[in-house]
Image: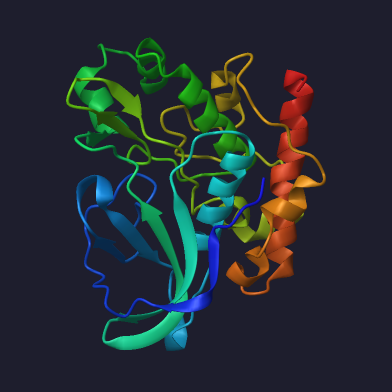
Amino acid sequence: MRINDITLATQDLRYLSWDECHSPSGMGGARPKAREGTGANAVYYKLAPLGGRGRAQGPENANQLLCTRLARMLGFPTADCRLIRARVVFGGEELETWVLRSKSYRSAGERGMSLEDFCNAEAAAGESPAGFCLRMGWGEQLGRIALLDYLTANRGRDGSGVEVLCDPRGHMRLSPLTGGSFSLCSAFPRRMWQLDPLAELPSAGFPGGGSLQDNLALVPSGLPVEPLRPSSRRELMRNMDAAFNGDDDLLEGSWQIIWRRWQRYARIRGV
């Protein structure tokens, strides 16, 4: 699989206004956002965190793309996102940084609600969000979420990180997978990933629980998954050195987290 989801040549996005409040799941968080178009034709943009002199700081946007890229390699349907090097104007200052662009995953006429809000409105008394998803027939997507979040150490899958989409005929589905910005090396306090990429981390873990490892129980037996190989690293990390601003340490750490966790999952499940 050839992956082409990074634009290295600087694009001119100075026309965007970074005042978008609403965003689809997977584009949440406090970072500035912009939008072009509406409905199923909407395209969303998210800025990387900024440091001094307009420099991008932190790998959050790169993390989100890398996790989404991994989901595609595993054979999971994902949202369409791309990382773009761009010139933007923010806070009256012109700067060059990394921007994450995501196309709307809604079909024409579909409306969305966060999975947490939908659970609060429709789940039976005492029913857990995971139990509710299983009753709704969303067990396979629930398993994909649990596996992706475990492999990427995603600590930020909160209640707004997945949407329930409903078309005009009343058919409902969960939104495609998106990666997590608070994941991989960013998810580990004090660079603990250098010591133990398998370390258990407390997580929002919605719609599962607070343990990424325990949430693997939500992965159904026989879930179709394309296995990772040592050779997967090359394609997974293609052009990511630029997105991580040349930080080879973070790149290698990200791969070790993914690979070591995949090896544990494959051993447990006999993949």
Q: Nearer the viewer, residue 263 or 128?
A: 263
Question: Is 238 left or right of 211, judged from the image as shown?
Answer: right
Residue 261 is situated, as x and y percent measured from the top left of the image, at 71, 38
Question: Is 189 left or right of 163, judged from the image as shown?
Answer: right
Residue drawn at x 45%, y 85% as measured from the top left? 52
- Residue 193 appears anywhere in the view: no
Question: Is 123 left or right of 131, judged from the image as shown?
Answer: left
Q: Residue furthest right?
A: 230
Question: Is 84 left or right of 103, judged from the image as shown?
Answer: right
Q: Nearer the viewer, residue 58 or 19?
A: 19
Residue drawn at x 82%, y 44% as measured from the top left? 230
Relative vertical location of residue 220 with respect to residue 257 in this rendering, above or below: above
- Quadrant (top left/top right/bottom left/bottom right) for the N terminus: top right
Relative vertical location of residue 260 with respect to residue 270 in this rendering, above or below: below
Q: Give the quadrant of residue 251.
A: bottom right
Residue drawn at x 69%, y 44% as measured from the top left? 258
Relative vertical location of residue 228 with respect to residue 138 in this rendering, above or below: below
Residue 5 is situated, as x and y percent measured from the top left of the image, at 54, 58
- Which colouring convention does the figure follow? rainbow
